[in-house]
Image (tube, rainbow, N blue to C red):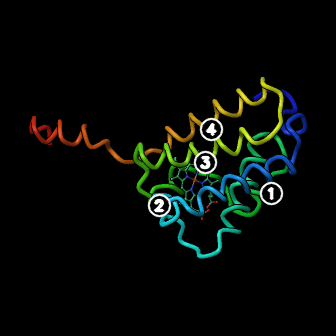
């Protein structure tokens, strides 16, 4: 991560705005909305905001409140296939596009978000399941 990314991109104000915009999309998304256990999305908004602030070099409030992020473990209960990943990224990218930032910072942020979204997938794609069934691999 580049030096002082957190302050250069706009600190807490930037991340709060980003996650708020993102959740406007999540709130009406047919794939994502049912995954969120709480009626009120405010606590989820707060967790993602604090996590991103901490990751990019801001205050470590996320870990003080939630402990180690363990993102894969915390996502294990949700079925994250390519469709869910793409829905998540679609809303996140539209939130990123709405905000002003240096192109260099935007690229770094987008690369990170895309990588983590891939890494959090936990569902074997249908084609792979079909392939392994057809070839009796399991
Ligand atoms: C790939 C698609 C993704 C889906 C479908 C997804 C879905 C969810 C859901 C349903 C929750 C529970 C809401 C809550 O209680 O906070 C959650 C929490 C969270 N997600 Fe994701 N997520 C995805 C990708 C990501 C990515 C890319 C990141 C980070 C860059 C991320 C970071 C987090 C964090 C920090 C939490 C709160 C963890 C906690 O402290 O409990 N998620 N996610």
Task: Look at the numbered disc 4 and say if its residue's Cβ is closer than 8 Å to ligand 1.
Answer: yes
Q: CA distance from mark 1 to mark 2?
A: 31 Å
Q: Residue at x 43, y 50 (%)?
A: 80
Is tag 1's residue or tag 2's residue first in the polypeptide sequence? 2
Estimate the x, y position of residue 22 in percent, counting from the top left.
Answer: 67, 52
Q: CA distance from mark 1 to mark 3?
A: 25 Å
Q: Nearer the viewer, mark 1 or mark 2?
A: 2
Q: Nearer the viewer, mark 1 or mark 4?
A: 4
Q: CA distance from mark 3 to mark 4?
A: 12 Å
- Rendered image quadrant of residue 43: bottom right
Is tag 3's residue or tag 2's residue first in the polypeptide sequence? 2
Packing grade of label 4 (10 A; few <14, some 14-19, many >=20) is some
Q: Which residue is mark 2?
A: 30
Q: With 135 as the anchor, is 11 left or right in this view?
A: right
Q: CA distance from mark 1 to mark 4?
A: 20 Å
Q: Residue at x 71, y 68 (%)?
A: 42
Q: Are marks 1 and 4 in contact (CB under 8 Å)?
A: no
Estimate the x, y position of residue 90 in percent, counting from the top left.
Answer: 57, 43
Which disc number belongs to residue 113? 4
Q: With 29 as the anchor, is 18 left or right in this view?
A: right
Residue 103 in the image: above or below residue 77: above
Q: Which residue is the extreme one toward the bottom? A: 39
Packing grade of label 3 (10 A; few <14, some 14-19, many >=20) is some
Task: Look at the numbered disc 1 and say if its residue's Cβ is closer than 8 Å to ligand 1.
Answer: no
- Rendered image quadrant of residue 138: top left
Q: Are marks 3 and 2 in contact (CB under 8 Å)?
A: no
Q: Which residue is mark 3?
A: 91
Q: CA distance from mark 2 to mark 4?
A: 21 Å
Label 2: element kind: loop
């Amino acid at each position: 991560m580049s030096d002082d990314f957190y302050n250069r991109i706009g600190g807490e104000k930037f991340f709060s705005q980003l996650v708020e915009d993102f959740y406007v999309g999540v709130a009406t998304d047919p794939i994502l909305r049912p995954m969120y256990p709480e009626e009120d999305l405010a606590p989820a908004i707060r967790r993602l905001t604090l996590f991103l602030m901490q990751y990019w070099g801001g205050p470590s409030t996320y870990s003080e409140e939630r402990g180690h992020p363990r993102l894969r473990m915390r996502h294990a209960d949700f079925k994250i296939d390519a469709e869910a990943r793409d829905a998540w990224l679609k809303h996140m990218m539209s939130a990123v596009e709405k905000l002003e930032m240096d192109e260099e910072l935007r690229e770094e942020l987008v690369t990170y978000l895309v990588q983590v979204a891939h890494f959090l997938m936990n569902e074997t794609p249908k084609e792979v399941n079909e392939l392994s069934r057809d070839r009796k691999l399991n």
